[in-house]
């Protein structure tokens, strides 16, 4: 059997089964970050993301934006766990005939974003590669009581997103702002029950929250904040790389959030599992939709 | 200018100059690991290494050994700083038509070595890639008083290596044992002044120690433990990927080590900077040799 048949998530499940970890690992494979014992007050968060030419960007993409994206996608994972990003390591695979000016610009993209979010670039590796390849690992910290994972959504919770969805195809995937500030605001003033970043499309990433919470959801077409760059609702539901946060709040907190801050848009509610993922269209008609989205294989 | 002209170390120096880090970073780019503030007793060590098909292994290499090597090279970096390896993240770039059995075997290579050294595999990433690509990040801990870096070698120190050199070309680079145990033994019973792992050849890696210590060295051909797989001394001096430890001890400790343990071989001594790296051949003739070795560009 080929991995194209098993699929990305099939492969991850297969790997997960083989792995044993010790008691210092609070959460291993299967969330936005690994969560590790650090000190009495904090957990250490660790995450990595690999970007490859022809998959995550093209040879025509501005190298500044490539470098920026390589760090931003991992920062988005730290945000999804409500952490503060602290350190990063950068592995870079390059062709030998790459101009130094190209690497300078790529590096500038990484360093400018690192500076903005006070991330220390502390190490890395260089190698020869035919396709330009970047792998960025980020370490972060989160207070134990602020850690937010994919699991924890409860029936009756309101589902929220930051920003607009579906615009990635027109370039947002290269320019998005990782929602670190929004995540910190949320955990400091509200208590999201479950949170994830939308990297593979709303339907698939909400699917992770529903699976972990053993629940279902209603989402309302009229409430989904569609980007002006989206061609249609499908771009928001199944298109990858919006890198917005998706989270749930109990009704009472949800009402309070809606009164105090307009950056966060309610799009639906957590239901009993039997509803699966149900889309309510603008005419009020219900339809079950697949929890699918971008997959590498 | 192309990076092939600037070279690997030229590129690293160029990047280093642009990077600012905060006071929690004890050591950033430029040693085997990044060294980060952790708690009162320990530093956190972080390192990553990228392995690419056609550079670090071929399409004919047993995938078990590819997986094993991907973790082993980063463990060797933790050893060089005298740390204990604790966690790893694995990013994997694969062709969609890779057989699942191939990935299983590659994973087994990683997990078997992880188990042996009690490393928790806590996360990773999957992507599509034309060349098989692995990037493994490892986190470790080291007691503050046991941290050993490239800097610190003093005139009169004796230079030691673990194991034999120059055999990598015949396959050792796929099967070496990261010297974590040896490093821990050394810091617990002796006090290496400076340490590095030999990843790019003895001459180049000793060069890093000499540069950091602002010193020179005499090494003795008759003392260099040549692998039976080495074709000649050049394989040991300039061949990459032995992954043995190279360290220095003051004369008194060196004598004590030689009396008590035969795993460590003395190969020379640290001198004044003016001698550069001087090789003493079997006939007693001195010659300056270049501090060069494997370079990616």
Image (tube, coloured by chain):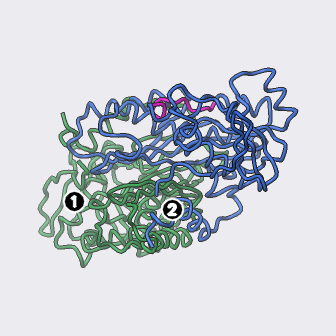
Chain colours: A green, B blue
Residue A151 showing in the rendered view: no
Residue B108 showing in the rendered view: yes
B241 displayed left or right of A16? right
In the image, farthest residue toward the right: B252
Q: CA distance from mark 1 to mark 2?
A: 43 Å
- State the image coordinates of residue A32 (x, y, percent, origin top left): 42, 51
Is mark 1 in CB contact (under 8 Å) with mark 2? no
Chain for mark 1?
Answer: A
Q: Which label sits on residue B36?
A: none
Above/below status of B169 relative to B17? above
B95 displayed left or right of B220? left
Mark 2 closeness class: few <14, some 14–19, many ≥20 residues within 10 Å: some
Label 1: which secondary element: helix
Q: Please name whichever residue, B87 or A276, is drawn nearer the observer in this view of the structure.
A: B87
Q: How many marks?
A: 2
B207 drawn magenta: no
B176 drawn magenta: yes
Label 2: which secondary element: loop
Above/below status of B20 relative to B188? below
- State the image coordinates of residue B33 (x, y, percent, origin top left): 61, 49
Residue at figure coordinates x 44%, y 65% from the top left? A72
Q: Quadrant of residue A65?
A: bottom left
Mark 1 closeness class: few <14, some 14–19, many ≥20 residues within 10 Å: many
Name the residue tied to disc 2.
B7
Q: Quadrant of residue A282?
A: bottom left
- State the image coordinates of residue B168 (x, y, percent, origin top left): 49, 34
Which mark is nearer the camera, 1 or 2? 2
Name the residue tied to disc 1.
A238
Q: Which residues are magenta?
A: B171-180
Q: Quadrant of residue A211?
A: top left
Chain for mark 2?
Answer: B
């Amino acid at each position: 059997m080929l991995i194209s048949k098993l699929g990305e998530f099939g492969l991850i499940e297969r790997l997960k089964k083989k792995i044993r970890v010790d008691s210092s690992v609070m959460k291993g494979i299967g969330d936005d970050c690994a969560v590790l014992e650090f000190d009495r007050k904090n957990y250490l968060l660790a995450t990595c993301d690999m970007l490859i030419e022809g998959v995550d960007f093209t040879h025509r993409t501005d190298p500044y934006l490539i470098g920026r994206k390589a760090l931003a996608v991992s920062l988005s994972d730290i945000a999804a766990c409500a952490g503060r990003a602290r350190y990063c390591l950068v592995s870079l695979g390059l062709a030998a005939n790459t101009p130094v000016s190209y690497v300078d610009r790529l590096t500038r993209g990484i360093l400018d974003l690192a500076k903005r979010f006070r991330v220390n670039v502390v190490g890395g590796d260089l190698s020869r590669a035919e396709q330009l390849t970047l792998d960025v690992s980020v370490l972060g910290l989160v207070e134990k009581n602020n850690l937010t994972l994919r699991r924890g959504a409860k029936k009756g919770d309101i589902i929220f997103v930051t920003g607009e969805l579906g615009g990635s195809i027109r370039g947002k995937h290269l320019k998005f702002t990782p929602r670190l500030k929004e995540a910190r605001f949320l955990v400091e003033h509200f208590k999201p029950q479950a949170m994830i970043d939308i990297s593979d499309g709303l339907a698939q990433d909400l699917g992770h929250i529903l699976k972990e919470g053993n629940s279902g959801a209603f989402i309302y077409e009229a409430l989904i904040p569609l980007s002006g760059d989206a061609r249609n609702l499908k771009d928001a539901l199944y298109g990858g790389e919006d890198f917005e946060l998706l989270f749930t709040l109990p009704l009472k907190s949800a009402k309070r959030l809606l009164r105090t801050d307009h950056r966060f848009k309610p799009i639906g509610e957590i239901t009993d599992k039997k509803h699966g993922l149900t889309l309510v269209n603008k005419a009020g008609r219900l339809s079950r939709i697949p929890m699918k989205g971008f997959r590498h294989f």
